[in-house]
Amino acid sequence: MAETKPYDVIIVGAGIVGAAAAWQLLQVQPDSRVLILEKESTVACHQTGRNSGVLHAGVYYPAGSLKARMCREGMHDTEQFCERKQLPFRRCGKWIVATEDSQLSRLSQLQKRAMANGLQPQWLSREAIAEQQPALRGEAALSVAESAIVDYAAICRALLDEAQAAGAELITDAQVLGITESQRDIRVFSRAGDFAAGKLLCCAGLMADRLARLQGLDCALRIVPFRGEFYRLAPRCEHWVSKLIYPVPDPALPFLGVHVTPTVDGRLLAGPNAVLALSREGYRWSDIDAKTLTELAGFRGFWALARRHYRTGLAEIHNSLSRQRYLQLLQAYCPGLNLDDLSPAPAGVRAQAVTPRGELLHDFAFIDSRRSVHVINAPSPAASSAFPIARHLVARLLQQ
């Protein structure tokens, strides 16, 4: 085999985390030889390009957690980058709406958590909701002015453009087939060729655990894919709300519930739910992958998760298969909606790491070897936190 071209760092994955890491690395070490490998024919195809575009402010995450700290830093960094690159950005604010009295204590807890994370949420009464957003119904709401909306795919492309202008190479259609690490270097074997480098950074999202195991690393976590299905609301609804409208989430789950989201291009989205996907990239019920099903069936953590949350899982299947049921979730806080207002929009799939005990991992998680760093769990708000995650990854990589 011909000698492979040496690089300082190979980055696998051209989603927003990989793109931000390449950009950050070249900010810190401008002379680095950086190669970015992307398995698709274009960038930002999966989680980066298939989300609601929310720039989270850090309401939900425990004070002191990586998520809380990086979310707050990321909000500031993302706004600055969007301003510099003239990318869409709108600080519209978020309301978390309690539709029942039983949710008020959880809403109060969220207020305390948001304040611990440096935010200044405002408590809104039923009367204030009706006065400020007449299309909504709720017993109370928490208003978070800092939340915003952006276009993450556009941010990702801009980061990659700047990284390439600084000398990085980007190769698409480069699915990784093997990784070997030695005393001398680390080698990546892909459909686009074989490459060697001093360091490897894997930001592979839905394939994160597979690449760690492909390298021979001990990765007890497994990615369980959850599809998030969206609907576009009819044009008649687009003036009803000017904020991000969220329900009060279940604290046991890392999902935020079906919400209503204005987008930077003027649409109004509803979603996502969180239904088990039958493929790592299963954007439809008909997307079924035997390898994914075999992995799930052989992972005891999946069965423990299913036993613990089977009622929620069955409800999510119902929500997915029944548009009427999905509508009912929205009508809890937006009663004027009807079935004709819901048009299917592209779905996304969330890469959720699960422990062998069946626990949904809430915080970011990484696995290192002597020459590599793998991002194993980077669910929402990873896009909001892409810049500080990138700083963390680059520092981790260079300290090895």
Image: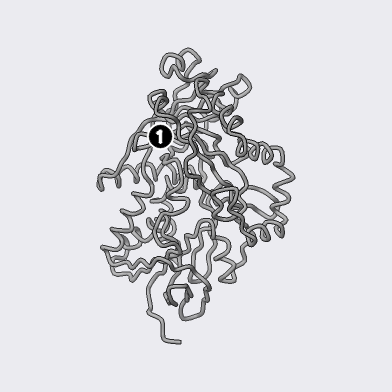
Q: Observer-nearest residue: 2 or 18?
A: 2
From the viewer's perspective, is 88 left or right of 321? left
Left or right, 161 with reference to 125 = left
Residue at image coords 52%, 24%: 338
Residue 140 percent coordinates (x, y): 52, 19
> Who is closer to the viewer here, 262 or 377?
262
Determine crowd level at label 1: few under 14, some 14-19, many 20+ residues with C-alpha closer than 10 A: many
Name, please, the residue furthest toward the bottom: 1
Counting from the top left corner in percent of width and height, residue 205 is at: 51, 56
Q: Is residue 16 above or below residue 265?
A: below
Residue beneath disc 1 = 147
Can you give x and y, in whole percent of width and height, for residue 68 in the image? 48, 42
Tell me: residue 104, above or below residue 4. Answer: above
The image position of residue 122, as x and y in percent, is: 44, 23
Question: Left or right of 52: which side holds 207?
Answer: right
Q: Amino acid at mark 1?
A: Ser
SS for tag 1? loop
Q: Residue at x 31, y 53 (%)?
A: 158
Residue found at x 56% / y 23%: 332
Locate residue 107: give its quadrant: top right
Front-most of 312 and 139?
A: 312
Using the rendered view, name the quadrant where residue 22 is placed: bottom left
